[in-house]
Amino acid sequence: MSDQLDTEPGGERIHDGDPSGTTDVATQRSLETPHSGGELETRFRDPGLPAHVYRHSDIDPKAAKRREREVATLFGLSTLGTLLFIVAYFAIKPNDTSGSELIDRVGLSTRLLGLGLGLALFCIGAGAIHWAKTLMPDDEIVTERKPMRSADEDREAAVEALKEGAAGAGLGRRKLIRNSLLGAMAPLGLLAIIPLRDLGPLPGDSLGETAWGPGKRLMSDPAGRPIKPEDVEIGGVVHVLPEGIEKSEHRLNEEAKATAILIRLAPEDLLAQRPDRKGWDVSGIVVYSKVCTHVGCPVGLYEQQTHHLLCPCHQSTFDVPRNCKVIFGPAHRALPQLKITTNADGYLVAAQDFQEPVGPSFWERGK
Amino acid sequence: MPTLEERAGNIANEIDERFGTAKFVRRSARKVFPDHWSFMLGEIALYSFIILLLTGTFLSLWFRPSQGQVVYDGSYVPLHGLKMSEAYSSTLHISFDVRGGLIMRQIHHWAALIFVAAMIVHSARVFFTGAFRKPRETNWLIGVALISLSIIEGLLGYSLPDDLLSGTGFRIAEGVLLGIPVVGTYLSFFLFGGEFPGEDLIPRIYTMHVLLLPGIFLALITVHVMLVWYQKHTHYPGPGRTEKNSVGYPFFPVYTAKAGGFFFITFGVTTLLSAFATINPIWLFGPYTPTQVSAGSQPDFYMGFLEGILRMFPNWEITAWGYTLSLNVLVPTLIIPGVLFTLMAIYPMLERWVTGDNREHHVLDRPRNAPTRTGLGVMSIVTWLMLLAAGANDILAITFHLSINSITNFFRISIFIIPPISYVVTKRICLGLQRRDRDLVLHGRETGRIVRLPNGEMIEVHEPISEADLYTLTQHEPRHPVELEPVTDSNGIPRRSILSSKIRARVSRFYFEDTVNPPTPAEVHELEGHH
């Protein structure tokens, strides 16, 4: 850029302080240019491409030589980058160490490899562009555009050719062939869809059933220990899964539906419960599905002060004392409640499975 | 011993005798490419795609697309003994045990972000300069397809490592599928091979991510670039640049060196970024389990606007005759994005209908000379940014110590207020700039020199602008709303589509009624006569 000589094409700048009082002195040149017909009055004339400005390197061989050296230096730096990459690759093998050093070694290796590769690539690019901008010809050239539309005769000839071909095939005449071909092609799409049927089983009732059932102990997640009511203080929270879930055939599928959260409320906080949910808790301990009824994220944030459960994905907020009713956010339905009781050994157990499908709404969930 | 040139000539001869390449080379070597920094945005997208192919191939040599469960015993001790999928454990292997694996992963992820970002900015450039006008509508449509597919490709890509964050993305995708009326559960069971998360998802999306979608990208990008070549690139207005010519540098050697060099610069910068800026450190998130999620979960930026709509949409759900329609999921994730992308896709046709302009355009618009279009463009960007911010409402709440509820409610209301304001403001700014251009042409440039006349009057001297500037400021066509067609045609027979004609005239008035047209030589002449 610094190479640009400061030459103004056609730079005669006049009207320095015209004493006639004319402040509005624009554009005489354009107006005075003789023009054909009345076009003069509506549009300004296109003065054409500005004169070419020569660069230092175009007229000064020394400057050109300097540019050449700069380009070569950039290409040389690229070679150094490649060398750096190769050296770093063989010198650092991060997993030779283990433990806490690993992350540092991986970080060092990544930075050196990235630096080498980045330099190798960037300097080739910078060199090529510097070369193009300072040493390659920079005269702008002009080509004509032709309209995209074909010439009339070509269009006519094309239509003719197609008509002739269609007539030869008898597309218009032989309706039986045309119609039966259409009849054969139309259902072909089905063959692309039908074989996809075995992508998965049909849903059936599986979305409405979880691994919870009468007598299943509540196990803390991830420790996997059974829970007694006296283990949980007021305000305490335990993430729970049903006993034995780790042995199920599709563990993650079962966990995705059965995951639940246990919260112990103060007795006075339970007064806002729905009357038909009386007896679903064990001395203030209530259990709700942890799968958000919006799009299924685990509702894992419990605010002890307000007794709100918050979904970290889309901020649906559920009010625990009122049976996890939605009080804010995009979820519509309350979190399903799990009825619990204690077994003979005093451990918390489910009294039954959830009484409605857990998780996001779906079309036939009410059926 | 033949000289180098002779040997090259021999090879060229062998090739030409088989493929007749000389004809093509003769035409193409001096093909003109107009030059402007904004034309590089599309190049960045193209080069990022190539970087993605290269680094993606490298990663695929070690990645195991499987949800088979293994117990981890690799180099990264904090996760020892944990059950995880092979996909996650092989991603850990790439990060810690394959030399250069982590830098390749980071380049791949950064290049993906740059790919989408460059396409979005490129499309904005094309929009604001009117480069989508006839004959380039097809390339606009291809661009819209590429942007929308890239969002899906990105989602699949960051889901493959099967870490806690990516699995959460597909949990939400399951919720979205379930929300589709009638067939939702079926679609979900077919995608996951049964219940969520199942064991089929990762292998399935792997094939889509590395084969199906890249194949479609390659085909669309090839057509996109060939059309640019065939239809010739647009150029910005200026002296010597017309609708009938193309002004710029020759393909060989200047453009070859610049574009080729720019590929290496893009690759180099992406690599340096990846060397020093960690992205997606999956070892910190742990393996996916549907029972956990980390607070502050954020998708990649290109998903942000969808996340924003999903977070701010009201919790409407309809239940009737035992069937449930989840408007709170269906509308924000499928219907609204569908409408937005459709509007974007059909905009060129819409504008052509409004302007009634059926001619080819190769000279770009200066954005100020299309105030309504520029206003609509800025309004779209503002909407997009607001949705992006709404998708990060939890981050905003924590950063600025605000209530998440008030932030969400603010977005719910202001999404209907701020974008229209941004439209009006932008349009006013454009009209102001157009008037300033008019002033420059009619009165010249202010020089800041005050001159005292013999009669004592003080005036500021104005200087005429150069002929080149004058042309650049006045080259655009005057615009007028399309007229309402007469109720009867030239034969006195009543027209049939009076309503569509009325709508068209109305929309056209909305576009052009307050347009500022370029001054004419006649106006300048009149001013001078006046003095």
Image (tube, coloured by chain):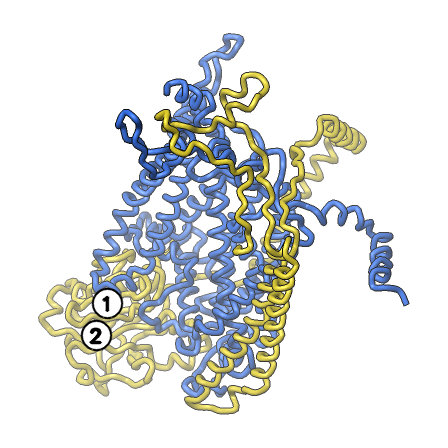
In-image side of A293 versus B102 (left or right) = left
Binning the other alpha carbons within 10 Å of mark 2 as few (below 14), some (14 to 19) or many (20 upward) gives many
| Residue drawn at 51 percent across, 56 percent down | B150
Q: Quadrant of the N terminus of chain B?
A: bottom right
Label 1 marks a residue whose chain is A
Dots 2 and 1: beta carbons under 8 Å? yes
Pointer 2 and pointer 1 on the same chain: yes
Dot 1 amino acid type: Leu
What mark, if any, has residue B124 been given in the picture?
none
Q: Chain B is shown in which shade?
A: blue
| Residue drawn at 58 percent across, 37 percent down | B241
In-image side of A287 versus A182 (left or right) = left
**In the image, residue B517 lies at what x, y percent?**
42, 28
Dot 2 amino acid type: Ile
Circle 1 residue? A309
Q: Please state which of residues B86 and A119 is positioned toward the viewer in this rendering.
A: A119
| Residue drawn at 17 percent across, 72 percent down | A304
Q: Chain A is shown in which shade?
A: yellow
Circle 2 residue? A263
**In the image, residue B130 lies at what x, y percent?**
50, 39
**In the image, residue B420 lies at what x, y percent?**
31, 40
What is the secondary structure assignment of the residue under circle 1?
A: strand
Q: Quadrant of the C terminus of chain B?
A: top left
Label 2 marks a residue whose chain is A
